[in-house]
Image (cartoon, rainbow, N blue to C red):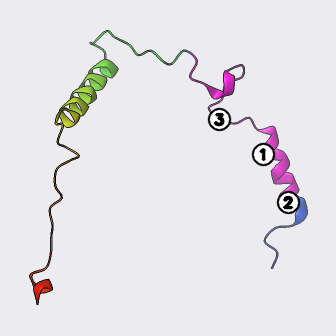
Amino acid sequence: MELASPEAIHLLMMRAHSVPARGLRRGSAAGGRSGRGRRCQCGECKRCLEEARWDRIFAEKFADPTYYSRPLVQVRSPLTSL
């Protein structure tokens, strides 16, 4: 069974090589985050408020030192003892 002709496959491969990858900027080292490492610190814009909200959520979640060391709840059927 042939899904595509060799000519069609060759044409698609040539197009794939000629289209630049999205997200990579020319001149950036290996697609690095040049200039995007710092965030706004104004505390008033929508993005700052959202980032502060998530920072609070993660701080509350990970502030409990026993969060990951809690014993697991054993859920068993009462019929297993029979």
Q: Position of residue 41 (x, y in %)?
A: 34, 11
Q: Amino acid at mark 3?
A: Arg
Instruction: Write the residue at 76% across / 38% down.
Output: 19
Q: Which residue is mark 3?
A: 22
Quarter of the image for residue 78 reads bottom left
Quarter of the image for residue 77 reads bottom left
Q: Position of residue 21 (x, y in %)?
A: 69, 36
Q: Nearer the viewer, residue 45 or 25?
A: 25
Label 1 neighbour load within 10 Å: few <14, some 14-19, many 20+: few
**Where does the magenta region start and end?**
8-34
Q: Which mark is residue 81?
A: none
Q: Which residue is mark 2?
A: 8
Q: Is residue 30 left or right of residue 53?
A: right
Instruction: Write the residue at 22% across / 29% down.
Output: 59
Nearest-to-viewer mark from 2 and 1: 1
Q: Amino acid at mark 2?
A: Ala
Q: Nearer the viewer, residue 48 or 79?
A: 79
Nearest-to-viewer mark from 3 and 2: 3
Q: Which mark is residue 16?
A: 1
Q: Is residue 27 magenta?
A: yes
Q: Earlier in the sequence, mark 2 or mark 1?
A: 2
Label 2 – label 1 distance at C-alpha: 12 Å
Label 3 – label 2 distance at C-alpha: 24 Å
